[in-house]
Image: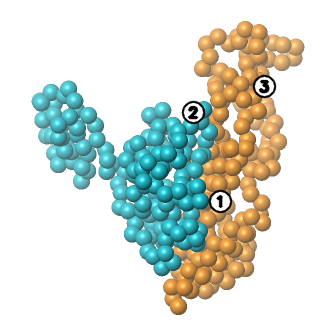
Protein backbone atom coordinates (compact mmCIF):
# COMPACT_ATOMS: atom_id res chain seq x y z
CA UNK A 1 0.00 0.00 0.00
CA UNK A 2 2.87 2.38 0.81
CA UNK A 3 4.53 1.69 -2.54
CA UNK A 4 1.26 2.22 -4.40
CA UNK A 5 0.52 5.42 -2.48
CA UNK A 6 3.96 6.84 -3.20
CA UNK A 7 3.68 5.92 -6.87
CA UNK A 8 0.30 7.63 -7.03
CA UNK A 9 1.78 10.68 -5.26
CA UNK A 10 4.48 10.94 -7.92
CA UNK A 11 1.85 10.63 -10.67
CA UNK A 12 -0.39 13.14 -8.88
CA UNK A 13 2.46 15.61 -8.54
CA UNK A 14 3.33 15.33 -12.25
CA UNK A 15 -0.34 15.90 -13.14
CA UNK A 16 -0.42 18.88 -10.75
CA UNK A 17 2.74 20.46 -12.21
CA UNK A 18 1.48 20.17 -15.77
CA UNK A 19 -1.85 21.64 -14.68
CA UNK A 20 -0.06 24.67 -13.19
CA UNK A 21 1.51 25.64 -16.51
CA UNK A 22 0.28 29.20 -17.17
CA UNK A 23 -1.47 28.36 -20.48
CA UNK A 24 -3.05 25.19 -19.12
CA UNK A 25 -4.15 26.94 -15.92
CA UNK A 26 -5.80 29.65 -17.98
CA UNK A 27 -7.71 27.22 -20.19
CA UNK A 28 -8.38 24.61 -17.46
CA UNK A 29 -8.50 26.59 -14.22
CA UNK A 30 -10.61 24.29 -12.05
CA UNK A 31 -10.96 20.64 -11.16
CA UNK A 32 -13.46 18.26 -9.62
CA UNK A 33 -12.95 15.57 -7.01
CA UNK A 34 -14.52 12.39 -8.40
CA UNK A 35 -14.63 8.71 -7.50
CA UNK A 36 -12.40 6.67 -9.79
CA UNK A 37 -12.64 3.31 -8.07
CA UNK A 38 -15.32 1.78 -5.85
CA UNK A 39 -14.48 0.86 -2.29
CA UNK A 40 -16.22 -1.54 0.08
CA UNK A 41 -16.21 1.14 2.78
CA UNK A 42 -15.97 4.46 0.97
CA UNK A 43 -15.10 7.54 2.99
CA UNK A 44 -17.67 10.33 3.13
CA UNK A 45 -15.79 12.77 0.92
CA UNK A 46 -18.68 15.24 0.81
CA UNK A 47 -18.36 15.57 4.61
CA UNK A 48 -14.56 15.80 4.44
CA UNK A 49 -14.88 18.46 1.74
CA UNK A 50 -17.39 20.64 3.57
CA UNK A 51 -15.70 20.25 6.97
CA UNK A 52 -12.45 21.41 5.37
CA UNK A 53 -14.22 24.56 4.20
CA UNK A 54 -15.05 23.52 0.64
CA UNK A 55 -18.22 24.70 -1.11
CA UNK A 56 -20.40 22.30 -3.03
CA UNK A 57 -21.39 23.69 -6.43
CA UNK A 58 -24.48 21.90 -7.75
CA UNK A 59 -23.61 19.09 -5.29
CA UNK A 60 -20.19 18.76 -6.97
CA UNK A 61 -16.82 19.02 -5.23
CA UNK A 62 -15.32 21.56 -7.59
CA UNK A 63 -12.83 24.37 -6.96
CA UNK A 64 -10.09 26.32 -8.67
CA UNK A 65 -6.79 24.45 -8.92
CA UNK A 66 -5.20 27.19 -6.83
CA UNK A 67 -7.76 26.88 -4.01
CA UNK A 68 -6.51 25.90 -0.53
CA UNK A 69 -9.24 23.24 -0.29
CA UNK A 70 -7.06 20.68 -2.07
CA UNK A 71 -4.40 20.84 0.64
CA UNK A 72 -7.07 20.98 3.34
CA UNK A 73 -8.72 17.68 2.32
CA UNK A 74 -5.40 15.85 1.95
CA UNK A 75 -4.19 13.55 4.70
CA UNK A 76 -0.72 14.22 3.31
CA UNK A 77 -1.10 18.03 3.15
CA UNK A 78 -0.50 18.10 -0.60
CA UNK A 79 -2.65 19.86 -3.24
CA UNK A 80 -2.63 16.80 -5.50
CA UNK A 81 -3.95 13.24 -5.26
CA UNK A 82 -4.01 10.79 -3.62
CA UNK A 83 -5.76 12.63 -0.81
CA UNK A 84 -5.76 9.65 1.53
CA UNK A 85 -4.57 6.05 1.68
CA UNK A 86 -6.44 3.77 -0.73
CA UNK A 87 -9.08 6.43 -1.31
CA UNK A 88 -10.23 5.62 -4.86
CA UNK A 89 -10.78 9.34 -5.48
CA UNK A 90 -9.15 11.47 -8.17
CA UNK A 91 -9.40 14.67 -10.15
CA UNK A 92 -10.94 15.72 -13.43
CA UNK A 93 -10.15 19.08 -14.99
CA UNK A 94 -12.81 21.68 -15.75
CA UNK A 95 -12.35 24.08 -18.63
CA UNK A 96 -12.56 27.85 -18.30
CA UNK A 97 -16.03 28.20 -19.77
CA UNK A 98 -17.54 25.67 -17.35
CA UNK A 99 -15.58 27.19 -14.44
CA UNK A 100 -17.04 30.60 -15.35
CA UNK A 101 -20.55 29.19 -15.58
CA UNK A 102 -20.12 27.56 -12.14
CA UNK A 103 -19.06 30.91 -10.69
CA UNK A 104 -15.55 29.74 -9.82
CA UNK A 105 -13.70 32.34 -11.89
CA UNK A 106 -14.42 35.71 -13.48
CA UNK A 107 -14.26 36.16 -17.24
CA UNK A 108 -10.93 37.99 -17.39
CA UNK A 109 -9.44 36.68 -14.15
CA UNK A 110 -5.94 35.24 -14.39
CA UNK A 111 -4.74 32.69 -11.85
CA UNK A 112 -1.23 32.66 -10.46
CA UNK A 113 0.33 29.19 -10.71
CA UNK A 114 1.34 27.49 -7.45
CA UNK A 115 5.06 26.79 -7.14
CA UNK A 116 5.16 23.47 -5.27
CA UNK A 117 8.01 20.99 -5.11
CA UNK A 118 7.58 17.28 -4.57
CA UNK A 119 9.62 17.22 -1.36
CA UNK A 120 8.22 20.44 0.14
CA UNK A 121 6.59 18.59 3.00
CA UNK A 122 9.08 15.74 3.32
CA UNK A 123 9.79 14.93 6.95
CA UNK A 124 10.56 11.95 9.15
CA UNK A 125 10.50 11.14 12.82
CA UNK A 126 13.79 11.03 14.69
CA UNK A 127 12.12 10.06 17.93
CA UNK A 128 14.42 7.79 19.93
CA UNK A 129 17.47 8.71 17.84
CA UNK A 130 20.52 9.39 19.99
CA UNK A 131 22.01 12.94 20.00
CA UNK A 132 25.13 11.52 18.35
CA UNK A 133 23.10 10.15 15.43
CA UNK A 134 21.17 13.44 15.12
CA UNK A 135 24.53 15.26 14.98
CA UNK A 136 25.68 12.80 12.34
CA UNK A 137 22.58 13.58 10.24
CA UNK A 138 23.23 17.32 10.63
CA UNK A 139 26.87 16.93 9.62
CA UNK A 140 25.96 14.74 6.66
CA UNK A 141 23.13 16.84 5.22
CA UNK A 142 24.01 20.31 6.55
CA UNK A 143 21.50 22.98 5.51
CA UNK A 144 19.47 20.46 3.54
CA UNK A 145 17.67 19.31 6.69
CA UNK A 146 16.19 20.96 9.73
CA UNK A 147 15.99 18.92 12.93
CA UNK A 148 13.64 20.30 15.54
CA UNK A 149 12.43 18.14 18.41
CA UNK A 150 11.53 14.68 17.15
CA UNK A 151 11.14 15.68 13.51
CA UNK A 152 13.62 16.11 10.70
CA UNK A 153 12.37 18.19 7.76
CA UNK A 154 13.85 18.23 4.27
CA UNK A 155 14.73 21.75 3.16
CA UNK A 156 16.33 20.77 -0.13
CA UNK A 157 18.84 23.08 -1.86
CA UNK B 1 0.27 1.63 -26.49
CA UNK B 2 -1.76 3.87 -28.80
CA UNK B 3 -0.90 7.31 -30.14
CA UNK B 4 -3.73 9.56 -31.31
CA UNK B 5 -2.56 12.48 -33.42
CA UNK B 6 -4.85 15.38 -34.21
CA UNK B 7 -3.62 17.12 -37.35
CA UNK B 8 -4.55 17.50 -41.03
CA UNK B 9 -7.80 15.58 -40.85
CA UNK B 10 -9.12 17.57 -37.90
CA UNK B 11 -12.36 19.52 -38.36
CA UNK B 12 -12.16 22.59 -40.57
CA UNK B 13 -12.81 24.91 -37.64
CA UNK B 14 -9.56 23.72 -36.04
CA UNK B 15 -7.55 24.30 -39.21
CA UNK B 16 -9.09 27.75 -39.49
CA UNK B 17 -8.32 28.44 -35.84
CA UNK B 18 -4.68 27.37 -36.27
CA UNK B 19 -4.34 29.89 -39.12
CA UNK B 20 -5.99 32.62 -37.05
CA UNK B 21 -4.44 32.47 -33.58
CA UNK B 22 -1.10 34.04 -32.77
CA UNK B 23 0.14 31.02 -30.82
CA UNK B 24 -1.08 27.92 -32.64
CA UNK B 25 0.90 25.65 -30.31
CA UNK B 26 -1.17 26.87 -27.34
CA UNK B 27 -4.32 26.08 -29.31
CA UNK B 28 -3.10 22.58 -30.13
CA UNK B 29 -2.09 22.03 -26.48
CA UNK B 30 -5.56 23.12 -25.38
CA UNK B 31 -7.32 20.84 -27.86
CA UNK B 32 -4.98 17.97 -27.00
CA UNK B 33 -5.65 18.46 -23.31
CA UNK B 34 -9.41 18.31 -23.95
CA UNK B 35 -9.06 15.03 -25.84
CA UNK B 36 -6.81 13.56 -23.11
CA UNK B 37 -9.28 14.66 -20.40
CA UNK B 38 -12.22 13.19 -22.33
CA UNK B 39 -10.33 9.92 -22.79
CA UNK B 40 -9.74 9.80 -19.03
CA UNK B 41 -13.47 10.34 -18.43
CA UNK B 42 -14.28 7.64 -20.97
CA UNK B 43 -12.03 5.10 -19.23
CA UNK B 44 -13.40 6.10 -15.81
CA UNK B 45 -16.86 5.41 -17.17
CA UNK B 46 -15.77 2.02 -18.54
CA UNK B 47 -14.25 1.19 -15.17
CA UNK B 48 -17.47 1.90 -13.31
CA UNK B 49 -19.62 -0.02 -15.81
CA UNK B 50 -17.45 -3.08 -16.36
CA UNK B 51 -16.74 -5.07 -13.22
CA UNK B 52 -15.15 -8.46 -13.94
CA UNK B 53 -17.61 -11.22 -14.80
CA UNK B 54 -16.37 -13.60 -12.11
CA UNK B 55 -16.88 -11.07 -9.31
CA UNK B 56 -14.30 -10.95 -6.53
CA UNK B 57 -11.81 -8.20 -5.88
CA UNK B 58 -11.67 -5.71 -8.71
CA UNK B 59 -8.44 -5.06 -10.57
CA UNK B 60 -9.79 -1.74 -11.91
CA UNK B 61 -8.24 -2.46 -15.30
CA UNK B 62 -9.88 0.50 -17.02
CA UNK B 63 -8.70 2.86 -14.32
CA UNK B 64 -5.15 1.68 -14.99
CA UNK B 65 -5.77 2.54 -18.65
CA UNK B 66 -7.07 5.95 -17.51
CA UNK B 67 -3.88 6.55 -15.56
CA UNK B 68 -1.81 5.70 -18.64
CA UNK B 69 -3.31 8.52 -20.73
CA UNK B 70 -0.48 11.00 -21.24
CA UNK B 71 -0.98 14.71 -21.71
CA UNK B 72 -0.78 15.88 -25.31
CA UNK B 73 2.50 16.71 -26.96
CA UNK B 74 1.70 19.74 -29.08
CA UNK B 75 3.36 21.41 -32.05
CA UNK B 76 2.12 24.33 -34.14
CA UNK B 77 -0.02 22.01 -36.25
CA UNK B 78 -0.59 18.80 -34.31
CA UNK B 79 -1.27 17.33 -30.89
CA UNK B 80 -0.41 13.75 -29.99
CA UNK B 81 -1.98 11.90 -27.08
CA UNK B 82 -0.49 8.59 -25.98
CA UNK B 83 -2.34 5.84 -24.15
CA UNK B 84 0.63 3.97 -22.74
CA UNK B 85 -1.13 0.89 -21.37
CA UNK B 86 0.42 -2.38 -22.58
CA UNK B 87 -2.95 -4.12 -23.03
CA UNK B 88 -4.83 -1.35 -24.85
CA UNK B 89 -4.13 -2.72 -28.35
CA UNK B 90 -5.36 -6.17 -27.29
CA UNK B 91 -8.61 -4.56 -26.10
CA UNK B 92 -8.96 -2.48 -29.24
CA UNK B 93 -8.27 -5.16 -31.84
CA UNK B 94 -8.58 -8.43 -29.93
CA UNK B 95 -6.32 -11.33 -30.88
CA UNK B 96 -4.66 -14.51 -29.75
CA UNK B 97 -2.20 -14.56 -26.86
CA UNK B 98 0.51 -17.23 -26.75
CA UNK B 99 3.22 -17.83 -24.22
CA UNK B 100 6.36 -19.42 -25.62
CA UNK B 101 6.98 -22.30 -23.24
CA UNK B 102 4.34 -21.86 -20.56
CA UNK B 103 0.63 -22.25 -20.15
CA UNK B 104 -1.74 -19.36 -19.56
CA UNK B 105 -3.72 -19.57 -16.31
CA UNK B 106 -7.29 -18.41 -16.91
CA UNK B 107 -9.18 -17.71 -13.66
CA UNK B 108 -12.36 -19.76 -13.18
CA UNK B 109 -13.55 -18.47 -9.81
CA UNK B 110 -13.79 -15.04 -8.19
CA UNK B 111 -11.02 -15.83 -5.70
CA UNK B 112 -8.58 -16.41 -8.57
CA UNK B 113 -9.44 -13.25 -10.48
CA UNK B 114 -6.54 -10.80 -10.71
CA UNK B 115 -4.24 -13.12 -8.76
CA UNK B 116 -1.36 -15.23 -9.97
CA UNK B 117 -1.47 -18.98 -9.19
CA UNK B 118 1.89 -18.42 -7.47
CA UNK B 119 0.03 -16.63 -4.67
CA UNK B 120 -1.69 -19.90 -3.69
CA UNK B 121 0.20 -22.68 -1.95
CA UNK B 122 -2.51 -25.33 -2.14
CA UNK B 123 -3.27 -25.68 -5.84
CA UNK B 124 -2.82 -29.02 -7.55
CA UNK B 125 -2.50 -29.81 -11.24
CA UNK B 126 -5.16 -32.00 -12.82
CA UNK B 127 -6.21 -33.17 -16.25
CA UNK B 128 -9.97 -33.08 -16.64
CA UNK B 129 -10.98 -34.71 -19.91
CA UNK B 130 -9.02 -32.80 -22.54
CA UNK B 131 -8.41 -29.79 -20.30
CA UNK B 132 -5.64 -28.96 -17.88
CA UNK B 133 -6.47 -27.19 -14.65
CA UNK B 134 -5.28 -26.06 -11.25
CA UNK B 135 -7.61 -27.15 -8.49
CA UNK B 136 -8.12 -26.18 -4.89
CA UNK B 137 -9.88 -29.15 -3.36
CA UNK B 138 -12.39 -30.11 -6.02
CA UNK B 139 -12.83 -26.58 -7.35
CA UNK B 140 -11.19 -25.53 -10.60
CA UNK B 141 -9.38 -22.28 -9.78
CA UNK B 142 -7.62 -21.89 -13.14
CA UNK B 143 -7.88 -23.48 -16.57
CA UNK B 144 -4.45 -23.84 -18.18
CA UNK B 145 -4.40 -22.95 -21.88
CA UNK B 146 -1.71 -22.87 -24.57
CA UNK B 147 -3.36 -19.81 -26.07
CA UNK B 148 -6.31 -17.54 -25.48
CA UNK B 149 -8.23 -15.70 -28.17
CA UNK B 150 -10.04 -12.56 -27.15
CA UNK B 151 -12.55 -10.57 -29.17
CA UNK B 152 -12.07 -6.84 -29.59
CA UNK B 153 -13.80 -4.71 -26.98
CA UNK B 154 -15.96 -2.42 -29.13
CA UNK B 155 -16.11 0.54 -26.72
CA UNK B 156 -12.36 0.72 -26.06
CA UNK B 157 -12.12 4.16 -27.66
CA UNK B 158 -14.84 6.81 -28.03
CA UNK B 159 -16.49 7.24 -31.43
CA UNK B 160 -14.74 9.31 -34.12
CA UNK B 161 -17.63 11.79 -34.03
CA UNK B 162 -16.98 12.41 -30.33
CA UNK B 163 -13.34 13.26 -31.06
CA UNK B 164 -14.51 15.70 -33.75
CA UNK B 165 -17.01 17.32 -31.38
CA UNK B 166 -14.38 17.81 -28.64
CA UNK B 167 -11.85 19.27 -31.08
CA UNK B 168 -14.40 21.60 -32.59
CA UNK B 169 -15.77 22.71 -29.22
CA UNK B 170 -12.39 23.41 -27.63
CA UNK B 171 -10.97 24.97 -30.82
CA UNK B 172 -13.94 27.34 -30.90
CA UNK B 173 -13.66 28.19 -27.19
CA UNK B 174 -9.93 28.82 -27.51
CA UNK B 175 -10.46 31.10 -30.49
CA UNK B 176 -13.22 33.02 -28.69
CA UNK B 177 -10.94 33.48 -25.67
CA UNK B 178 -8.13 34.81 -27.86
CA UNK B 179 -10.48 37.18 -29.65
CA UNK B 180 -11.90 38.40 -26.32
CA UNK B 181 -8.41 39.25 -25.11
CA UNK B 182 -7.27 40.99 -28.24
CA UNK B 183 -10.53 42.95 -28.65
| Left or right: B88, with A126 as reference point | right
User: What residue is shown at x 62% (from left), y 85% (from top)?
Assistant: B19
Q: Is residue A105 visible?
A: yes
The reply to whether callout 3 and callout 1 are in contact (CB within 8 Å) is no
Residue count near mark 3 (Cα–Cα under 10 Å), binned few <14, some 14–19, many ≥20: some
Q: Is residue A32 left or right of residue A150?
A: right
- Which one is nearer the viewer's eye here, A100 or B63? A100
Q: Residue B38's mark?
A: 1
Structural distance between the alpha carbons of marks 3 and 1: 37 Å
Subunit that carries the residue with mark 1 = B
Of tags 3 and 1, the one toward the viewer is 1
Q: Along the horizontal axis of the image, is A129 left or right of B8?
A: left
Q: Is residue B147 above or below residue B50?
A: above
Question: What residue is drawn where x is 40% and y is 52%?
Answer: A71
Report whether A149 appears left or right of B107.
left
**Mark 2 on the same chain as mark 1:** no
Percent x, y of residue A104 = 50, 67
Mark 2 or mark 1: which is in front?
2
From the viewer's perspective, is residue B42 above or below residue B134? Answer: below
Res. B78 mark: none
Residue position for label 2: A41
Q: Which residue is mark 3?
A: B145
Are the two marked residues, 2 and 3, in contact with CB atoms closer than 8 angstroms?
no
Amino acid sequence: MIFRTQTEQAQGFAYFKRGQDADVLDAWPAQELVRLEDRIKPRDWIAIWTQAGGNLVNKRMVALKTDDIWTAISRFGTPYPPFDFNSGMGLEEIDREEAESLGLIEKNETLKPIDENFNDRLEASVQGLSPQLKDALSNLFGDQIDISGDTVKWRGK
Amino acid sequence: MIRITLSGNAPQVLQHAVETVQRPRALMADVGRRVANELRKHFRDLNSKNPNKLGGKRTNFWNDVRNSVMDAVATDNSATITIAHPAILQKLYGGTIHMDDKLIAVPNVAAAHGRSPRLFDNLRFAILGKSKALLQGKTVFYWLKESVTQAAFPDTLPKDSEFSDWIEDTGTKHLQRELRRTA
